[in-house]
Amino acid sequence: MNAQTEKLPCFRERPTPPPIALIEGEMLVNHIVNTLCHSHNMTRETLNSKNRKESVAWLRFVCFTILREATCMSLQEIGGAFGGKDHGTVMHGIKRVEDRRSIDAQFNREFARWEEHFCKARGYKSLPANMALVKAA
C-alpha cells in the first residue's frame, strides 16, 4: 500500500486537503477551540475548567462535537484536550448537541455555520444523526 491509499488509524478517511486541512494535530485543536472561544468571548482557561455554568458547558459541548466531526480524535483524546474530561463526558456533550439541534432551529443554524467552517472546509460533510462522516464529493 502506498502512502496515499494507506488507511489512517481512525474510522474516517481523510480527503485531499483544502486550505484549513493544512492545519493538523494540536494546531487544529487549538485553532478550532480558540476560534470558538473568541467568537463567544470566553477564555480557553474557562472552557477547560470545571465550571458547569450553562454558557461554558454548551460551548464545551459544541467544541467536543466539532472536534469529533473535524478530526480523527478519540473521545478520550478530546476529553484530554479539555482538562482531562472523561470520555463519557464527551459522549454526553455530543448527545446534548445532537438533541438541541433537533429542537432548536436557531442553535442548529449557528452550529451549521461552525460545521461548515471547520468540517466542510476540510472536505467532510456531516451526518449528524449518527456522527459518521463521509468524504464530500
Image (cartoon, rainbow, N blue to C red):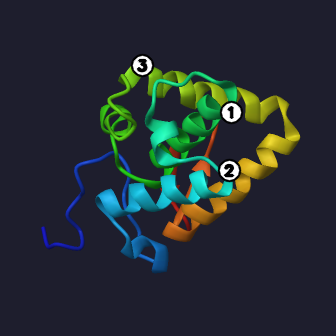
Looking at the picture, does residue 45 appear above or below residue 92? below
Residue 55 disc label = 1
> Is 49 positioned to the left or the right of 87 in the image?
right
Label 1 to label 2: alpha-carbon separation: 9 Å
Label number found at residue 88? 3
Q: Position of residue 92 (x, y in %)?
A: 53, 21
Question: Badge 1, how many Cα within 10 Å: few under 14, some, many 20+?
Answer: few
> Which badge, 3 or 2, comes first in the chain's sequence?
2
Give how far across and how far down residue 41 sits, in percent. Answer: 66, 51
What element does badge 2 sit on?
A: loop
Front one among 137 and 17? 17
Residue identified by numbered label 2: 40
Sequence-first disc among 3 and 1 = 1
In the figure, residue 86 lies in which quadrant?
top left
Image location (x, y in percent) of residue 18: 47, 78
- Dots 3, 1 in contact, CB < 8 A: no
Q: Nearer the viewer, residue 12 or 40?
A: 40
Q: Is residue 107 above or below residue 136?
A: above
Find out whether the residues at labels 1 and 2 contact each other: C-beta distance under 8 Å. yes
Q: Secondary structure at mark 3?
A: helix
User: As shown in the figure, which amino acid type bears the numbered disc 3?
Assistant: Gly
**Nearest to N terminus: mark 1 or mark 2:** 2
Rendered view: 19 above or below 87: below
